[in-house]
Image: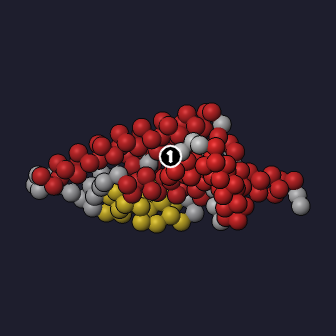
Amino acid sequence: METKTLYKKLTSVFLNWLFLFIVWNAFTSSFQAQEVITGLIISFLLALFTSRFFDCCSLRVLHPVSLFYSIVYVFVFLIALIRSNFDMAKRVLSPSLPINPGIVKFKSKLQSDFAKMMLANSITLTPGTLSVDLIEDTLYVHWIDVKTDDPEKVHAEIAQQFENILLKIFAE
């Protein structure tokens, strides 16, 4: 087996093991020795059998810089979520506000499928936008108030704040 392939498989098993163990601890809420040991064993066995299905990231996501930008991403997402909720509330409470719905497209600079999925989900979770399709690097988004159809301006308006941070988290 090639060294790079073995490293990727071991990385996948380790990341899945770590994630499953964190989930185990979150659900059990117990740090007694027998609970922790049971969680380590069960999460390891699950990681061995399921890691081939969940292969999204490398160990790079555990680098302190990536972890820092992951936390920053949560705050940027929450701010975008709050702003878009206020905008949608204003539109609902003032029906006279003009809306200009439509589907816009732009190209993403993200390389990994997982990062693109995170971008599309972040766009969908902010009210007023809905990711419709992702074809290779082109993302199609339904926007409740299309301000422009220039792909660069659309990218700057909808996705750039998320994408800039995701590029730092998933840098290879």
Q: Residue at horizontal 77%, vertical 53%?
A: 10
The residue under label 1 is 29
Could you tell me if residue 2 is visible in this image? yes
Q: Residue at horizontal 11%, vertical 56%?
A: 95
Vertical comparison of 81 with 13: above or below? above
Q: Residue 169, image x and y in percent?
A: 59, 42
Q: Amino acid at mark 1?
A: Ser
Residue farthest to the right, as pictured: 1
Q: Residue 154, image x and y in percent?
A: 40, 51
Horizontally, residue 5 falls left or right of residue 42, namely right
Q: Residue at horizontal 41%, vertical 53%?
A: 123
Vertical comparison of 161 with 21: above or below? above
Q: Residue 41, image x and y in percent?
A: 69, 54
Q: How is the image coloured?
A: secondary structure
Vertical comparison of 69 with 166: above or below? above
Question: Where on the picture, by quarter, is residue 82?
Answer: top left
| Element under disc 1 | loop
Question: Where on the picture, by quarter, is residue 47?
Answer: bottom right
Could you tell me if residue 167 is visible in this image? no
Vertical comparison of 62 with 17: above or below? above
